[in-house]
Image (tube, rainbow, N blue to C red):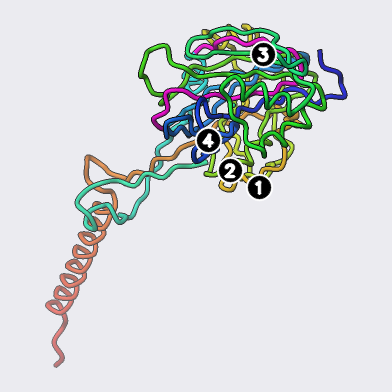
Amino acid sequence: MWTKRRIPALLFALFLTQAGALISPAYACGCGAMVPGDAARIGVDREASVVRWDGRTEEIVMRFTVGGDAREAAWIMPVPGRATVRLGDAGLFPELADLTRPEHRTRGYFWPRDKDWPFSSGGRDTVGGAAPGAGNPSVGVVGRERLGDFDVARLTATDPDALRSWLESNGFELPDRLATEVKPYVDQRWEYVAVRLAPKEPGRTLRGDLDPLRISFDSDRLVYPMRLSRMARTPQSLGLYVLAAHRMEPRSPIGGATPEVTFAGTVTPEGPLAELAGTAPLFLTAIEQRFPRPERIDGDHELRATAEDTPYRRIVHHDELLTAGGVPVWLLTVAGALTAAVAATAALLRRRRTRAGTAVPQG
């Protein structure tokens, strides 16, 4: 159980080497991604998470999209209290993507642009608008289970060096800097979820979307882990879905670009979302954030309720040249104006000739 003095819900993932020496670390968002043995490489291209918080309990479903040629890798996730871990439903993320998809609108423009005739032979402009031991008394093994492609060990530790020793003796190699970063959480007696990714199919590499993991624990505040992401060496992106009683927002950008809300509104959970959050209506906030320079990350995301539950849906505008019957309106307008001008000129000339022909000769 957490006390109110503790910061709840810190989760971070640190990808470590599985066997052999550490080779060319390649850190990633939310997890210090490492190179496993045999010169293989793995990197996290994107971290997407769903957070369900009811004021007492927090559940985080994390999914990583990875690239590289690694066949094994691992990470360790400190959590402020006793956690339960199981596989998440892979259908959760497509459902949320559908709920938060932008509204597409078409708006017309009059004059031709670069890709329109007569400037170009084809194409139309499209403009987008405002889219996670044994033999050492200082380390305890709470439990261990196999979940799909994951080998999960839940640990306690009262000494950062003991934790490092346990990890190393169990096939993990923890860099000195990470050991230093972990110390504050050891001092606060946090627990740890050590996860080893080892595909059940021999020879399969870890690429694309990995199976999501679902971690649950008690929480009286909503904090999403990002502080250790400052060890990333390449720009990162985070997609965060927050399900709570109200619209939520980060207290600060924590060193990244300004967080962008791409959706905010009340939803009625169905399917995989209902299994996670129940069937009662909830407020869903979708947040995107980029970290061009991860080394500037200076804390964890602490989320708070906004002053008002203002709904929002992103709008994507598709600009199209105005046409009538397949003919550009500007062309019809110009042609009509020219025709009218010619007719007016002809009429004026006729009137002048008529006046000249009827003039009375001077005596």
Q: Distance of mark 3 from mark 4, alpha carbons?
A: 24 Å
- Mark 4, other Cα within 10 Å: few <14 / some 14–19 / many ≥20: some
Q: Distance of mark 2 from mark 4, alpha carbons?
A: 25 Å
Q: Name which quarter of the figure residue 142 lies in.
A: top right
Mark sitting earlier along the chain (4/1): 4
Q: Which residue is mark 3?
A: 154
- Numbered circles on residues, count: 4
Comparing marks 4 and 1, which lies closer to the viewer?
Answer: 4
Q: Give the side of residue 150 with respect to residue 348, left or right.
A: right
Closest to the observer, 186 or 44? 186
Mark sitting earlier along the chain (2/4): 4
Comparing marks 2 and 4, which lies closer to the viewer?
Answer: 4
Mark sitting earlier along the chain (2/1): 2
User: Relative to 341, does residue 29 appear above or below in the rendering?
Assistant: above
User: Relative to 228, does residue 223 appear above or below in the rendering?
Assistant: above
Q: Quadrant of the C terminus?
A: bottom left
Q: Tag 3's secondary structure?
A: strand
For the residues labelled 2 and 4, say whether their Cβ atoms are less than 8 Å apart: no
Q: Which residue is mark 1?
A: 296
